Image (tube, rainbow, N blue to C red):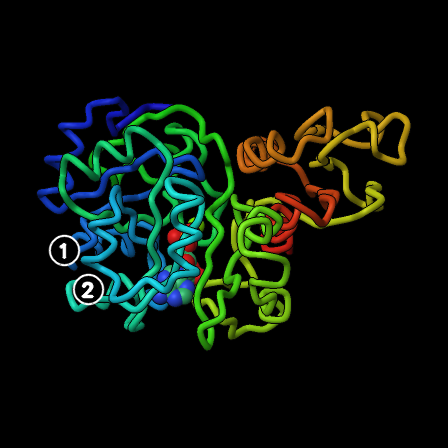
Amino acid sequence: MSQRVEIGVDVSRAVSQILSGQLVAIPTETVYGLAADALNPLAVARIFEAKQRPKFDPLIVHIASQETLALIAKNVPLIIQKLIDQFWPGPLTVVLPKHECVPDLVTSGLSSVAIRMPDHPLALQLIQQSEKPLAAPSANLFGRTSPTTALHVAEQLEEHVAYILDGGPCKVGIESTIIGLCNDVPTLLRPGGITIEQIESLLGKGAISSSYSENQSTDSPLAPGQLKEHYAPLTPLIIAKKPHRPDGCRRVGLLTLQKAELDQQRPELFFEVIEELSSTGNLTEAASNFFAAIRRLDAEGLDLIIATPFPAYGLGFALNDRLSRAAR
Ligand code: AMP
Ligand code: MG
């Protein structure tokens, strides 16, 4: 592929581009982000244009210190502070009432703002050195598979970014967990890289409202932008517990956690390509491979991708969420 955008590790170059209102792709532990100065509405507008993202889908603001948190969020309830102290920097986003300085475009006109502190040295350096909070959704076209390497970003968005900071493959590999407050009760708005089990071991069982599963079946969920169709490859993807090649499909690919757990003895006989996410069934390893595996399958020119569901605990919960939105 001919590369029209530069990829590198030059943080000072990225700083000047952020300060001049341009877009920089940044590595984080979850997925690569398409970052702009969150306090500059013109720069933020470029994110929506580049991604073709609808304006009703609010962005997450990335910060590098809790002092910045106080500048953009109005008050931080004790229970949210507890989560922040435990999980930041890391894949946890909190939704809090916003200060005036946060442009309406960032929050899609909501009076609340979503904030997190990413756990990646290059992202943190960029935020610290530019002295700006960064609005950054995933660096892919809207609705498509999230990028977990610098090259993934270049494949889709090279014409739109000034520079891609290359921090290597993303360690966690799926997006952050989002927690908001509903009638003062912490509520799961999106499952992600911090598991419910981790949150419950900190706050106690049942401390987080579980309205998420009810919400996701509707078209007007609690968290705006949590659309039913998302993360989708161009190849049709279906989910099946017992994957078999349907009649009429010549080339079918399989996405599975662990081959050894499949019913079939010789899956190679039925599937053109198999992506096994972790030969030991490790969900952390599976999450870090997940989006890249979907991209590889999508590049194979298959008729169909069949994915087996993940176990419904730990990171499996977030992985099943991504899978169900990628399916059609
Ligand atoms: P991403 O698409 O990974 O950039 O994550 C952004 C998602 O965070 C949005 O699609 C919303 O679901 C959620 N979000 C962002 N801001 C808010 C907010 N103020 N209130 C509720 N959810 C939000
Ligand atoms: Mg995204």
Q: Nearer the viewer, residue 36 or 205?
A: 205
Residue type at mark 1: give it: Asn
| Residue at x 68% of width, y 27% of height | 278
Q: Is residue 257 above or below residue 187?
A: above
Camera sees residue 111: yes
Q: Is residue 212 above or below residue 262?
A: below
Question: SS of the residue at dot 2?
Answer: loop
Residue type at mark 2: give it: Pro
| Residue at x 58% of width, y 36% of height | 287
Mark 1 and 2 residues: CB-CB less than 8 Å, in contact? yes
**Quadrant showing the N terminus:** top left
| Badge 1 or badge 2: first in the primary sequence | 1
Q: Which residue is mark 2?
A: 103
Q: Nearer the viewer, residue 41 or 192?
A: 192
Q: How far from the left and from the top, in percent, is residue 122?
A: 28, 29
Assess disc 2: are there few (<14), some (14-19) or many (≥20) residues with their C-alpha within 10 Å of its C-alpha.
some
Q: Which residue is mark 1?
A: 40
Q: Nearer the viewer, residue 263 or 247?
A: 263
Q: How far from the left and from the top, in percent, is residue 251?
A: 73, 35
| Residue at x 72% of width, y 36% of height | 256
| Residue at x 55% of width, y 53% of height | 191
Q: Is residue 142 left or right of residue 187?
A: left
Camera sees residue 57: no
Q: How far from the left and from the top, in percent, is residue 296?
A: 57, 31
User: Which corner quadrant of the image does residue 125 belong to?
Assistant: top left
Q: Is residue 151 left or right of residue 308?
A: left
Q: Is residue 97 above or below residue 60?
A: below
Q: Is mark 1 within 8 Å of ligand 1?
A: no
How far separated are the C-alphas under marks 1 and 2? 7 Å
